[in-house]
Image (cartoon, grey):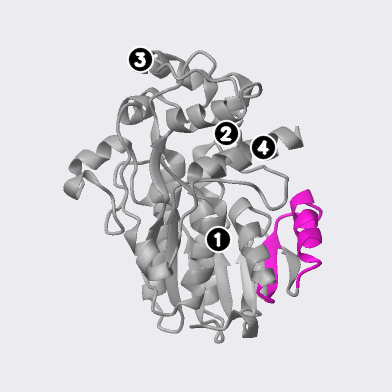
Amino acid sequence: MLNLNNEKILITGGSGYIASWIAFKLAEKGCHISLTARRLDDPRCLLLESKVQPLEGTVQFFQADLLDKDSLRKPIMDSTLIFHTASPFKSKINSAYKDLILPALEGTKNVLNLAKENPNLKRIVLTSSVAAVLGDNQDLRNYPNQIADESCWNETSSEAHNPYSYSKTLAEKAAWEIFKSQNQWSMVAINPSFVIGPSITHHPKAESFQVMKQYLSGAFLLGVPEIYVGAVDVRDVADAHISAMENLSAEGRHITSAKDTGFKEIGIHLKKKFPQKVKFSPRTVPKILIALTGRFISKLLTYKFIMNNVGYVWRTKNDKSINSLGIKYRDILQSSEEMIEQIIQKN
């Protein structure tokens, strides 16, 4: 086991949903953490600093941009361990390439190539996604036993179709190529499914919150699309990252997902817990109707996406994360409840 208290730890994308929980949990352990952020006056940075203040550990932010290699140089060179979490995840985009693919791919290359120049670096934990494992739900028909595991790669996404998934696939493949080109530091990848649960900064900008807000906005008032996903609590994802860093025997990819579920199951639970706030009907919206209207909701809800995902189950293995990282997954319905409660309080 690696003693993280003796290490110089860097978290890229430090103001992010997952990164802030990693930082908080490390600070609880007494670690001193450096984090990068595009803006030091980001309210999420200030809130994290205030949350960590009573703890034994500390956080310090450095202004850096993934696409500006020089801005990353000092924090990377001063580190012995890196959690590379920074990567955009958003549905409102103008250009798939500029908004998703470029920062994910080039940002990862910049971080890992600089890591090759740091003679003191020991280990990197990379935040990837199950999106790099599975593109469309219907792809499972061609997977062994119709279930995805760490040996699987997303082979169906592109810049035009599922660009976020494509960006995560390109970024993780590039990371493993750079890793193979050196023999100084080790690397582990964490591949979370749909991440839910409360934000440590109470300033929820994560795309997961935008999705969950639909239970309150009335988007599901007349019914819900038959969309199935894997879901996992953000705190479990943070624990997986930290365990992967501490446990030097951990290697390769780790699907981090508590349960295969769907928006209907989550909605039924939330409606029972928040009957006055949640605007939800368990009726199933016809697939063809979603296919015709999805594009007006988000550029990512294309006809092809709807046809390849709605009505198809989602199945992934999570035994490696349990056995290798020791993760004991939270109940994701409870996680969704805590998340909605935070959104209600914030608004």
Report the disc number at residue 261: none
Name above or below for residue 31 compared with residue 139. below
Name above or below for residue 291 compared with residue 149. above
Label 3: which secondary element: helix
Label 1: which secondary element: helix
Residue type, mark 4 in image? Glu
Tell me the quarter of the image containing the C terminus: top right
The residue under label 2 is 212
Residue type, mark 2 in image? Met
- Gap between marks 3 and 1 measured at Cα: 38 Å
Choose mark 3 or mark 1, whichever is in front.
1
Farthest front residue in view = 272
Q: Position of residue 257 (x, y in %)?
A: 42, 51
- Gap between marks 4 and 3 measured at Cα: 33 Å
- Residue located at (76% from left, 64% from top): 52
Residue 270 or 321: which is nearer the viewer? 270
Residue 260 or 298: which is nearer the viewer? 260
- Residue located at (62% from left, 66% from top): 11
Residue type, mark 3 in image? Ile
The residue under label 4 is 341
- Gap between marks 1 and 4 measured at Cα: 21 Å
- Gap between marks 2 and 4 measured at Cα: 11 Å
> Which span is picked out in magenta?
29-55
Report the disc number at residue 288: 3
Q: Quadrant of residue 311?
A: top left
